[in-house]
Amino acid sequence: ELLYSRPDISPDDISARANAIMSRKGDGRKHALDEIILSIMSGSAGQVVETMFSLCGGSSGAALPATVTSLLCNLLIDAECISSEEASSSSVNIQTELLILAAEAILSSFSVQEQSNVGVRAAVRLLLPHAPPKRVEGEVVYEPRISATIAEAISHRLPDTDAEARDLLHLCEEAIRLGSVRIADACESIAFSRASFHRSKGHLHREVYWLLRGMEILSNELPTQFQRKFGFACRRHFDALCENSANDLISMLASTTYATNGESNLEEEAFVSVLQAARNVLEAVVQDEDMASLLKGHMEANLLKYVVDIALADALGDTTKMASDIVRCLEERCLPGEEYGGVVSTLANPKMYAKLLHISVAILHKEESLFNGTMESTKCAFSVHGMHILMARLTQVLSWEGITTSSSAVPKTPTKERKEYFHAMRLTLCKGLMRAFASAQTNSSSEKDGRGGGVEQSLDDEVELMLSPCI
């Protein structure tokens, strides 16, 4: 009514005239609400937030008033009507406190209504604009409590569908690119939860997809100074998946195709099932364009690739390809990358050594049965270098089995059958080495005559390598 009767009134005079009008009403005493209105008219914008919080339900825990109070506070701070801190000496940030209270009210209200997915998304969307670090007057201003609240809300939520998980990851992309490690860790937990769900359902391809998404978040999307190569939980389970798939396939191959008693111990359908599962894991990695290039030097992924190639080469009868891939799995190499620290290791896990040697000896035994006694026509699937690798691994296995060691610290006592088995294996490797020398000499002569292809390494170099100390 005051503005209607005097539209040209000065803004500074509104509070004074309103105070006079309120004093003439009733008994001349102003009520609490009148005092609040007069304080706001006098320019006390902080009174607006205080009133919304105390009298209008902002502190009640209800989602709507808490959110309105928080948003109103943000508007007043952006308009520079109030400061986010009560005083220069105060460490309480009003804007942060109201945002966190609003987010907690949203999560609580929607959880009661059994709509947790909506509550998490709404709370994250409310907090995200205030989560990334900001540069103010040359300094980076970062509010860790906002990121911690977002990370807690996300990590406590197990998405019901892949679409919900992708939506949450998409929401947090910008904050992760700006360097919020806490939010990145929470997003990895989302990816891991989806991978665990698909593992329980037997969806191997989808499990690998989500494990790679979790690895990508921490190794590719964060700024360079914050990146953690392949992450944590997702990487450990991806490594275990690749290694277990490779070990199962090699065990199945050794027990079905190269059984000691000449018969398959398991049905062929079981072997095909294990092979298909390993190929599904490998195909999921290859089809992921974003991660395939990063996994080129990954130990477990490369191990799985070579093991699948061994099984496929066996189906085609290509013993040369099998021999080459077996050697790649068993030869020692300096692992690339700073995270390995120059460690020397093999792609294959030590528990796979005996099975790979068993398959190798079976290949050599088959070659020996076809050997007609003439060195000129002899062939060996393994090179001299390959035989050196096989003998080095056999030496390790014999030591672990307690066959060639004199140490009393080895509690394992091999049986007579076990000793005879490894003795026959060593004898077969020795005969294979003889054929490897002969085959290498034949290839060298053919190359000199211009009738053969080039060899990777000369015979003298391979002999020197074989006789040199093993790492």
Image (spheres, rainbow, N blue to C red):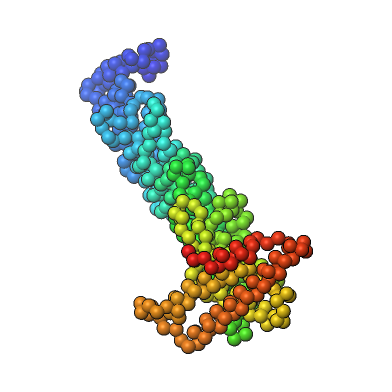
Residue sitting farthest toward the bottom = 416
- At 41% across and 16% down in the image, what residue appears? 4
Counting from the top left corner in percent of width and height, residue 277 is at: 59, 67
Q: Please tell me in which quadrant of the rendered image residue 251 appears.
A: bottom right
Query: Vertical placement of 297 versus 56: above or below?
Result: below
In depth, the one of 176 and 460 nearer the eye is 460
Quadrant in the picture for the N terminus: top left
Query: Vertical placement of 404 versus 125: above or below?
Result: below
Counting from the top left corner in percent of width and height, residue 337 is at: 49, 52
Counting from the top left corner in percent of width and height, residue 371 is at: 70, 80
- At 42% across and 33% down in the image, what residue appears? 134
In depth, the one of 250 and 407 nearer the eye is 407
Give the left or right position of residue 454, taking residue 126 as reference: right
How many circles with numbers are drawn on the protein?
0
Give the left or right position of residue 317, taking residue 43 as reference: right
Residue sitting farthest toward the top = 8
